[in-house]
Image: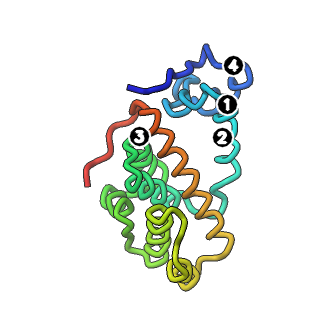
């Protein structure tokens, strides 16, 4: 059971109504549970939505979903594992096998493999990566812009993982398949 009270559409302040409409498309204007919990602080939800709108410009949806899956796996966030397993299938067209691989920092494509290894290192080492971790990305042909966007994607996912773990956000998606 969630530790925060969800802010339903009809209770949300006027400043959040456009955000609720945008995030709730296809759901009768009601956003998913994480956003209803974030709405307890309009500043938190507004900042998160703004950050999302500014990020994810360089990396493909398939890479972004793999990052989300791996970060959620490492941080033990069942909510994000469930949500991103669904998005990985329906938006990024990843197979169940590719989803499981991503959760283990594995990929068939070498550049993607290096990206996931970097994500795993950043999360497990709390950002204090080695020169070798960084050089592996550069050797794989990852640009400086991609590296910046990759770090932003990791941080956005860590925020949602921690938010859900702290608040015990109720699942509104089928649970992720076990590894």
Q: Residue at x 64, y 41 (%)?
A: 48
Looking at the rendered image, the disc whose residue lies closer to the viewer, 3 or 1, is 3
Q: Tell me where residue 7 appears, x and y as whole percent.
A: 56, 21
24 relative to 169 in the view: left or right: right
Separation (CA) of disc 4 from disc 2: 16 Å
Which callout, 1 or 2, points at the residue further toward the start of the chain?
A: 1
Q: In what element is the residue under mark 4?
A: loop
Q: Earlier in the sequence, mark 1 or mark 4?
A: 4
* Residue 16 located left or right of residue 113: right
Q: How far is mark 3 from mark 2, CA to CA?
A: 18 Å
Q: Secondary structure at mark 1?
A: helix
Q: Earlier in the sequence, mark 3 or mark 2?
A: 2
To which residue does mark 4 refer?
13
In space, the residues marked 3 and 1 are separated at their CA atoms by 21 Å
Quadrant (top left/top right/bottom left/bottom right) for the C terminus: bottom left
Kindly check if marks 1 and 2 are in contact, taking CB atoms under 8 A apart as contact: yes
């Amino acid at each position: 059971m969630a530790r925060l009270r969800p802010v339903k559409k009809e209770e949300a302040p006027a400043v959040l109504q456009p955000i609720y409409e945008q995030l709730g498309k296809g759901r009768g204007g009601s956003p998913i549970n994480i956003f209803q919990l974030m709405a307890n602080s309009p500043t938190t939800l507004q900042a998160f939505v703004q950050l999302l709108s500014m990020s994810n410009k360089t990396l493909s949806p398939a890479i972004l979903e793999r990052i989300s899956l791996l970060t959620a796996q490492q941080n033990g966030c069942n909510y994000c594992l469930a949500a991103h397993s669904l998005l990985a299938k329906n938006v990024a067209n990843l197979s169940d096998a590719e989803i499981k691989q991503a959760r283990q920092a594995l990929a068939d494509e070498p550049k993607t493999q290096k990206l996931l290894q970097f994500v795993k290192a950043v999360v497990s080492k709390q950002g204090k990566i080695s020169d070798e971790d960084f050089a592996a990305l550069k050797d794989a042909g990852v640009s400086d812009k991609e590296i910046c966007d990759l770090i932003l994607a990791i941080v956005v996912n860590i925020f949602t993982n921690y938010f859900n773990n702290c608040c015990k956000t109720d699942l509104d998606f089928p649970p992720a398949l076990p590894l």
